[in-house]
Amino acid sequence: MPQEQQPRPEPLDPPMVPIAVAGLVVWAVAGLVLLLFFRDWLTAHGHQNWLWTCLAGFLWGFPGLAVMMRHDANRRRRRAATARQG
């Protein structure tokens, strides 16, 4: 006898802009902490590329933020269309 399947839950679709902004903030804070407090240590141990990594993460966050803004706008549009149909 086949068992009745329970309905699948709706997939999560959280707003993505706050996540992208949090990523930008994390890279910025990490870079500033390294620059202000650990610059001499980084130079002495040959790890200056850590600062460049933080800068790259921060700068690449802006295209990511733009993509997430577009994603959230499309999500709002999809939900509004679904609400009108339902």
Image: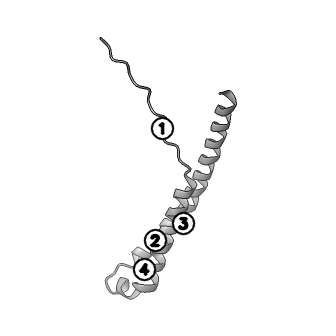
Q: How far apart are marks 2 and 1 (CA)?
A: 33 Å
The residue at which mark 3 appears reads as: 59
The residue at which mark 4 appears reads as: 34
| Disc 4 element | helix
The residue at which mark 1 appears reads as: 11
Quarter of the rendering occupied by the C terminus:
top right
Residue 51 percent across, percent down from the top left: 44, 76
Mark 4 surroundings within 10 Å by alpha-carbon count, few (fewer than 14), some (14 through 19), many (20 or more): some
* Callout in the foreground (1, 3): 1
Q: What residue type is labelled 1?
A: Pro
The reply to whether discs 4 and 2 touch (Cβ–Cβ < 8 Å) is yes
Q: Distance between the residues labelled 4 and 1?
A: 39 Å
Q: What residue type is labelled 3?
A: Leu
Looking at the image, is mark 2 or mark 3 earlier in the sequence? 2
Q: Taking 28 as reference, is 20 above or below it?
A: above
The reply to whether discs 2 and 3 touch (Cβ–Cβ < 8 Å) is no
* Callout in the foreground (4, 3): 4
* Callout in the foreground (2, 1): 1
Looking at the image, is mark 4 or mark 3 earlier in the sequence? 4
The residue at which mark 2 appears reads as: 54
Q: Which amino acid does label 4 sit on?
A: Leu
- At 49% from the left and 62% from the top, the residue drawn is 23
| Disc 2 element | helix
| Disc 3 element | helix
Looking at the image, is mark 1 or mark 3 earlier in the sequence? 1
Looking at the image, is mark 4 or mark 1 earlier in the sequence? 1
Looking at the image, is mark 4 or mark 2 earlier in the sequence? 4
Residue 64 percent across, percent down from the top left: 55, 56
- At 49% from the left and 42% from the top, the residue drawn is 12
